Amino acid sequence: MSKRAKLSISLVFGFSDEDQIGTIQPHDDALVVTLRIGGYDVKRVMIDQDSAADIMYPELYRGLNLKPENLTAYSSPLVSFEGKLVVPKGQIRLPVQTGTDVVEVDFIIVDVFSPYTAIMGRPWLHTLGAVSSTLHQKMKYPSGDRVLEIVGNQIAIQQCLVAAIQHRLEVETSATADNNL
């Protein structure tokens, strides 16, 4: 009786020109997706390989009915997109589901404007084993013996850009009015 060698197949995943089918090209869009966070489908989540933290903004914090007592302390300041120092309100651990895979994520709560509801950074990407591509507007990750993908939403990123421009105009208009007083 012979023993059969058990073959171990490593998953290899990458991106090809075929992964660009269905995207608006050329573009320089960020990767914005919908994820299931805390049991809810959350739109306008930016995938950011350059972020060393997973961030949640006020709109999502309120939308999930989270309260200050749900937070744990987090005292390290962060730097916002505008280059300003931001003191987080705290931290909360919530499940983030992709397909059937669930990863517990420590979100840092910041109370500043963002056109995004959350930013998923390297901590989540690395835990999931995911690789993202803004060019291809996709994120791929291993799940069991398969490679699954999440597709970005280029319409959502355009909406985020419009919201960011409107917010900036409101801030500038407010600052101009304050200076004229």
Image: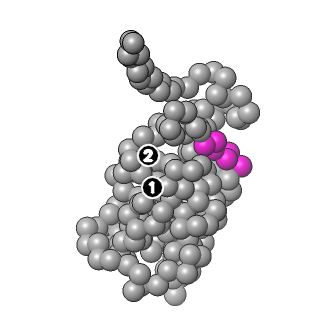
Rendered location of residue 156, percent (x, y): 67, 53
Rendered location of residue 118, percent (x, y): 51, 61
Q: Dot 2, how many residues are within 10 Å of its Cα: few (below 14), some (14-19), or many (20+)?
A: some
Give the answer, above or below, for where 143 lies relative to 83: above
Give the answer, above or below, for where 141 lies relative to 8: below
The foreground one among 128 and 87 is 128
The foreground one among 58 and 98 is 98
Residue 22 marker = none
The foreground one among 19 and 37 is 37
| Residue drawn at point x = 53 percent, y = 67 percent | 38
Residue at mark 2 = 128
Residue at mark 1 = 103
Magenta stretch: give its range: 150-155
Disc 1 versus disc 2: distance between alpha carbons?
7 Å
| Residue drawn at point x = 40 percent, y = 68 percent | 93
| Residue drawn at point x = 66 percent, y = 28 percent | 20
- 38 left or right, relative to 55: right
